[in-house]
Amino acid sequence: MRWSGGGQWVCPRTQHKVPTHVSESDGRTGAGVARGGLRGDRFSRSRGHPAFRGFRAEGSWTLASYAGFFESELNRTVFWRTLKLGAIVTAVSAVIGYATAYSIVTLPPTARGRMIGLVVMPLMISPVARTYAWIVILGRTGFVNETIVWLGLSDTPIRFLFTETAVFIGLLQLFLPLMILSLISALENMPKDAVPAARVLGANWLQVFVKVILPLTKEGLVIGGTLVFTGSLTAYITPAILGGSKVLMLETLLYQRVTVANDFASASIIAMILMVMSFSANLLLKRLATARNKR
């Protein structure tokens, strides 16, 4: 606020004039009114923030923008593809992660440290470099296709790039170390005699995993699952390189809406959907772990 010289405060943004004095029955000073005006102005600006645009339409709060987003067949396809690939990558990471983590934990200390170093090593390499390596491996003249043709499984190279399979492989390789490290930490905190005791009592390996290992390592599974699932949802480089425009995911769709279409309203809706999916995945994993404890 600035003083106009005419006995009034003037807001520099809206040029709204506020008197210095009001009636005593009102019980407020002109400065109080000015501060209230500024707070209201800040609130009105916050409602125009991109994070809130998807909830506003014609001056009222509504979810019509989100309903309109899902009316598009393209948007629905991209949403379900993102959810499906995220869930599959998380599930496969859990299966491979448990087997790998248990094998590492049972090794001697020296060998265990070396194996953990090998697991951590991919995290030190740029995701761009790791993703481009898959182009060399999965390309028409790559190692996979050359092996398939050499074995006589196909007469012509198979198209792997720009498919959901390529995106799945890239995301799995990108986030699998996070699951393995989370499960290694959980398995190291598990009582050392739990598995041998279950085996002595006659439990097979499936019963040992379901009844002993899984309940005792659920915290590591929740952390690893959250990291892998949210990472798969929000990854941009891997889907953009290995999927291209043929295998759009929410993150690549968001990038297109901002940079190509300059549609910030749709971009804010996609960003909010990604946030809700990430938080929902974490709550669901926690709920499943709690439900197992109650049983």
Image (tube, rainbow, N blue to C red):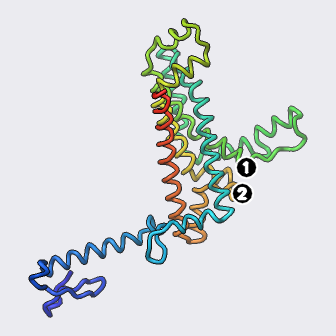
Q: What separation in Å lies between label 2 and label 1 (alpha carbons)? A: 7 Å
Q: Percent position (x, y) of residue 187?
A: 48, 22
Nearer to us in this view, 161 or 3: 3
Q: Which mark is residue 71?
A: none
Which of marks 1 and 2 precedes in the sequence? 1
Q: Quick one: SS at disc 1?
A: loop
Locate residue 51 relative to residue 135 in the image: left or right.
Answer: left
Q: Which residue is mark 1?
A: 163
**Count of number-bearing discs:** 2
Q: Is residue 73 above or below residue 214?
A: below
Q: Residues within 10 Å of mark 2 (few under 14, many from 20)?
A: few
Q: Are marks 2 and 1 in contact (CB under 8 Å)?
A: yes
Nearer to us in this view, 197 or 260: 197
Looking at the rendered structure, the kind of residue marked 1 is Thr
- Quadrant that contains the N terminus: bottom left
Q: Which residue is mark 2?
A: 246
Q: Percent position (x, y) of residue 286?
A: 46, 37
Locate residue 12 relative to residue 4 in the image: left or right.
Answer: right
Residue drawn at point x = 57 percent, y = 62 percent: 255
Q: Is residue 60 above or below residue 127?
A: below
Q: Which residue of the protein is positioned furthest toward the left in this rendering?
A: 24
Residue drawn at point x = 46 percent, y = 26 percent: 186
Looking at the rendered structure, the kind of residue marked 2 is Lys
Q: Which residue of the protein is positioned furthest toward the top in this rendering?
A: 200
Q: Which residue of the protein is positioned furthest toward the bottom in this rendering?
A: 6
Q: Quick one: SS at disc 2?
A: loop
* Residue 174 figure quarter: top right
Residue drawn at point x = 30 percent, y = 85 percent: 14
Q: Percent position (x, y) of residue 137?
A: 72, 41
